[in-house]
Amino acid sequence: MKYKLLSVNTPGIRINIGDYIQALASAQFLPRIDGFVDREALDSYNDEDTKVVLNGWFMHKPEHWPPSKCIVPLFIAFHLNPFTNGKMLTSTGLEYFKSKEPIGCRDTYTRDLLLKNNIKAYFSGCVTLTLGRNFYTNNKEDKCYFVDPIVSIKWNKLGLLKNLVLYFFLKYKIDKLSPKISFGKRNKGIRRKVRLVSFYLEYSKYFTDDTIFNAEYIEHESVDFSIKFPSDEMLLREAENLVRKYSRARLVVTSRIHCALPCLGLETPVIYIDGITDPRSATRLDGLKELFNVLKWDKNHLWADFNFTKKISISNPPQNKKSWKPLCDNIAQRITDFISQK
């Protein structure tokens, strides 16, 4: 029996390092790593039987479901996205799910969808909650990380004019912030200035200027990743580098669940930024968002769902909720049992 991790390094699909953070979490439980299997081509795997933890977002190419008989799966932290349009719930797909019950689901949306199709399923949460097993540290650095912080903007003439006027009043601060934050390569010129102004105006309601200007800004998804990290092994090492950073941080602010969830397990104070408007994407947060302290974008403004008495900095971060811990313990036990089974 081999032990492999999910790879999500498929040509034509933009790499999200969060997928490899999920793989890193699974790797903690394996006796060894014998390689990777491509999440988007599980049906074509034809090698020695291998155990694989099938966790994460499924999938861009649902026509390649179900997996090969050579894959011995554990379904835990599994998300079935509406973008598949039911293509994984064909009679063949349902028969496969039925044979692998119970299905541990990362979110309550997936659980409820499978239950409606008479598949035994339960809400497991995410495997990345277990990353504290190997990566927790007491050695903290005076660092804050903003990981893909998002900005919601209504692109009308009045809003654009207002932000451009404010740019000239805030130019010193905006120019200081500009080299740190990307917003993606398409956001250039006026669009970039408007986003930077909106970012500063909204986030400065909750964070001190020192926190905003001294933070390190990180991207989890980039077209450059396939060039910088051309192999699965390199992507896994980069995922580990990021997890170690988050473990040492005093505060993390992020719109990425595979930054926020690991931070819970690492016991690093984390604030989740919720700006999702597409209900199909929002399904992946069902049952997970309740685990976080959340800042939510609504009508182009940020609103807090948690209490704080003064602006947040690395010296006074909000304390994480504790509701993730039972999920973490259950995941660890189920994967340990799966690996030990012959």
Image: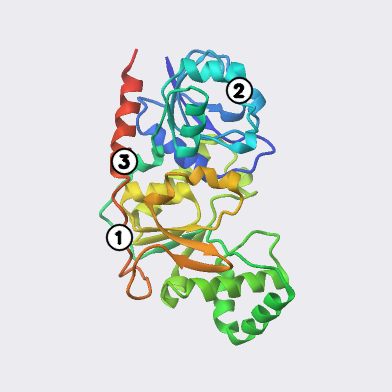
Q: Mark 2 points at which residue?
A: 65
**Rendered residue at 65%/78% (across/down):** 163
Q: Quadrant of residue 134?
A: top left
User: Relative to 203, is 92 above or below?
Assistant: above
**Residue 44 showing in the rendered view:** no
Q: Distance between the residues labelled 2 and 3?
A: 32 Å
**Disc 1 residue type?**
Gln
User: Quick check: 289 left or right of 67?
Assistant: left
The x and y percentages for residue 249 are 36, 59
Q: State the separation of the CA atoms marked 2 and 1.
A: 41 Å
Asked if 76 appears above or below 252 in the picture, the reply is: above
Please tell me which residue is depicted at 40% across the width and 37% down the height of the picture: 127
Q: Is residue 326 left or right of residue 292?
A: left
* Quarter of image, res 277: bottom right
The residue where tag 3 is placed is 134
Amino acid found under the numbered disc labelled 3: Asn
- Crowd rating for badge 3 (residues with CA inside 10 Å; few <14, some 14–19, many 20+): few
Q: Is mark 1 on a helix, strand or loop?
A: loop
Query: Do the residues under discs 2 and 1 have CB atoms within 8 angstroms?
Result: no
